[in-house]
C-alpha cells in the first residue's frame, strides 16, 4: 500500500533514470511512470526500436542531444572519451527546464540514456536528486544494438562494447561518490522481481511509489545472447567484464564469474564454426534475396511502363472528354437560342390571334346590325343619281354579301 505523500516543501528531489542504450531504461521508466513518477508531459513516442514508447521527456532529450553536438559528438551519444564541460548558456537552459518541471508540484523525474554522460552537470543543478541506474550485460546490449542495425556498429561492431564500457564506468564512478542517493539494479532482476526492486527504491531513496504496473512483455524485450557472447566480450574487451563485475557488486548480485562461467577453447571453437556456417547460410540467403529483389525491380520497371501507357490513355480520354464537353456546351447554346426564338414567335402568334379575334368581333357586329346592306343600298342610290359615292371607311364586305348585292342589282 502507498503511504501518504510528504508535503511539497519536504518532497524529495527528482528521480533520474538512466543507463546505457538498450539496457532496459525504457521498461524501467514505464514502471516508475506507472507507479506515480511524473516523467513529463511531452514524451518521445514509439518507433521500431521501442514499440511501446521510450518514456523520454523530449525537453531533456533535445537538451542532451544539443549538448553532445556542441562538444563535437554524434546525437546518439555513442562516445567513448571523457567529455569537456558544457558552455555556460547550457546551464541557464537546464535551469529553465528544471523550473518548468518543479512547477507541477508532484514527484517528478526523467529518463534519458544520454543523461549518463552528463551526470555531474545535472547533479550540480539538482543536489537533492535521486538516481535509479539500470544495467544489462555487455554482450546482450551489443547483440541488441547489432539487431537494431545502427550504422555506427555495422561499420565497427567493437564500438558497441566500448560505448557500453564508457557509459557504465561513469555510473560506477558516480555511484561510488554518491552511494546514498543511488540505486543500481540489473534489468533481469527488475523483470524477475519488480516488487523487491521498488521496495529497495522506496526504502533507500525515500520515495513514495505505487505498485509497479505489469508492463513487461517477453516478445518485446528480446532474447538473451548465448553464453559464448560473454567469453567473446571478455576476450575482445576485458575492461567490459571488469565493469560488469563492479556493477553487479554495487547491485548486490553474485560476481560475474558465478553468473556467467567462462567457456573453454573447444566450446568457443565449436561456436565459431556454428557462426561460420550460419554466416555462410546467411550469405546464400542474401544472394537469393538479391536475385529476388532484381526480379522484383524488373517487374516494377515493366509495371511502370504499363502504368505510363495507362496514364497516356487516361490523358487522351480526358482530352476527348474535354472536346465532348465543349461540343455539348455549344449545342446547349444553340438549343437555348432556338428556344428563345420559339418563345418570340409564340409571342407574336398570340398577338396575331388576338388581332384576328378582335377583327372577327367587329365583323360579327357589322353583320348583326345590317350595316353592310344599308351601305350597299346607299351606294346604289348614289349611282342611280349619277354621283360618285363617298369612299367607305368601313372594312369591305365579305364575298357572300357582295354576291347578294350583285344579284339584287
Image (cartoon, rainbow, N blue to C red):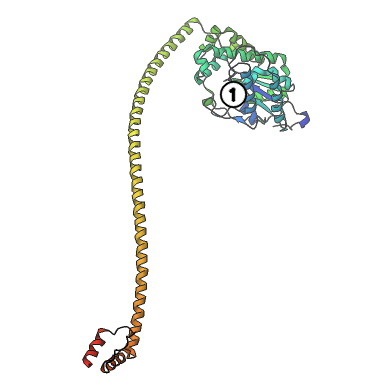
Return the x and y of residue 328 as percentages of the image width and height.
34, 51
Q: Residue furthest top?
A: 265
Whether residue 19 is visible to the viewer of this picture, yes or no, is no
Front-most of residues 79 and 320: 320
Front-most of residues 231 and 115: 115
Q: Residue at x 55, y 17 (%)?
A: 141
Quadrant the N terminus occupies: top right
Return the x and y of residue 256 as percentages of the image width and height.
60, 11
Return the x and y of residue 176 as percentages of the image width and height.
70, 13
Q: Quadrant of residue 120?
A: top right
Q: Residue furthest front?
A: 386
Whether residue 53 is visible to the viewer of this picture, yes or no, is yes
- In the image: residue 212, left or right of residue 103: left
Q: Secondary structure at mark 1?
A: helix
Q: Quadrant of residue 366?
A: bottom left
Front-most of residues 279 and 5: 279
- In the image: residue 9, left or right of residue 363: right
Q: Residue at x 58, y 7 (%)?
A: 238
Establish if 409 lies above or below 230: below
Front-most of residues 366 and 307: 366
Q: How many marks?
A: 1
Return the x and y of residue 153 as percentages of the image width and height.
52, 15
Establish if 143 lies above or below 306: above
Q: Which residue is mark 1?
A: 191
Amino acid at each position: 500500500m502507498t503511504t501518504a505523500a510528504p508535503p511539497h516543501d519536504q518532497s524529495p528531489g527528482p528521480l533520474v533514470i538512466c543507463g546505457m542504450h538498450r539496457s532496459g531504461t525504457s521498461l524501467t521508466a514505464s514502471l516508475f511512470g506507472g507507479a506515480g513518477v511524473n516523467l513529463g508531459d511531452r514524451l518521445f513516442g514509439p518507433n521500431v526500436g521501442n514499440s511501446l514508447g521510450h518514456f523520454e521527456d523530449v525537453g531533456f532529450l533535445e537538451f542532451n542531444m544539443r549538448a553532445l553536438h556542441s562538444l563535437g559528438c554524434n546525437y546518439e551519444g555513442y562516445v567513448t572519451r571523457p567529455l569537456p564541460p558544457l558552455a555556460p548558456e547550457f546551464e541557464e537552459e537546464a535551469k529553465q527546464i528544471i523550473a518548468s518541471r518543479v512547477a507541477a508540484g508532484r514527484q517528478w523525474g526523467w529518463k534519458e540514456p544520454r543523461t549518463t554522460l552528463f551526470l555531474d552537470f545535472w547533479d550540480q543543478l539538482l543536489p537533492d536528486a535521486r538516481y535509479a541506474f539500470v544495467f544489462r550485460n555487455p554482450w546482450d546490449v551489443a547483440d541488441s544494438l547489432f539487431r537494431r542495425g545502427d550504422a555506427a556498429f555495422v561499420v565497427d561492431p567493437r564500438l558497441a562494447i566500448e560505448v557500453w564500457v564508457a557509459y557504465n564506468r561513469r555510473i560506477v564512478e558516480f555511484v561510488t561518490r554518491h552511494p546514498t542517493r543511488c540505486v543500481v539494479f540489473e534489468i533481469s532482476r527488475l523483470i524477475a522481481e519488480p516488487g523487491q526492486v521498488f521496495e529497495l527504491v522506496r526504502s533507500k531513496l525515500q520515495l513514495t511509489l505505487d505498485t509497479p504496473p505489469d508492463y513487461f512483455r517477453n516478445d518485446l524485450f528480446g532474447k538473451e545472447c548465448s553464453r559464448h557472447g560473454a567469453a567473446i566480450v571478455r576476450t575482445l574487451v576485458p575492461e567490459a567484464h571488469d565493469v560488469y563485475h563492479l556493477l553487479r557488486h554495487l547491485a548486490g548480485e553474485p560476481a560475474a564469474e558465478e553468473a556467467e562461467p567462462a567457456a573453454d577453447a573447444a566450446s568457443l571453437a565449436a561456436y565459431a564454426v556454428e557462426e561460420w556456417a550460419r554466416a555462410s547460410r546467411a550469405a546464400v540467403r542474401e544472394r537469393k534475396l538479391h536475385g529476388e529483389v532484381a526480379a522484383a525491380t524488373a517487374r516494377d520497371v515493366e509495371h511502370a511502363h504499363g502504368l505510363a501507357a495507362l496514364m497516356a490513355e487516361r490523358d487522351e480520354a480526358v482530352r476527348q472528354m474535354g472536346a465532348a464537353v465543349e461540343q455539348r456546351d455549344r449545342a446547349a447554346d444553340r438549343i437555348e437560342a432556338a428556344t428563345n426564338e420559339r418563345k418570340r414567335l409564340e409571342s407574336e402568334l398570340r398577338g396575331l390571334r388576338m388581332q384576328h379575334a378582335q377583327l372577327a368581333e367587329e365583323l360579327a357586329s357589322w353583320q348583326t346590325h345590317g350595316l353592310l346592306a344599308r351601305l350597299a343600298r346607299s351606294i346604289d342610290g348614289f349611282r342611280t343619281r349619277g354621283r360618285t359615292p363617298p369612299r367607305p371607311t368601313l372594312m369591305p364586305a365579305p364575298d357572300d354579301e357582295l354576291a347578294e348585292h350583285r344579284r339584287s342589282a
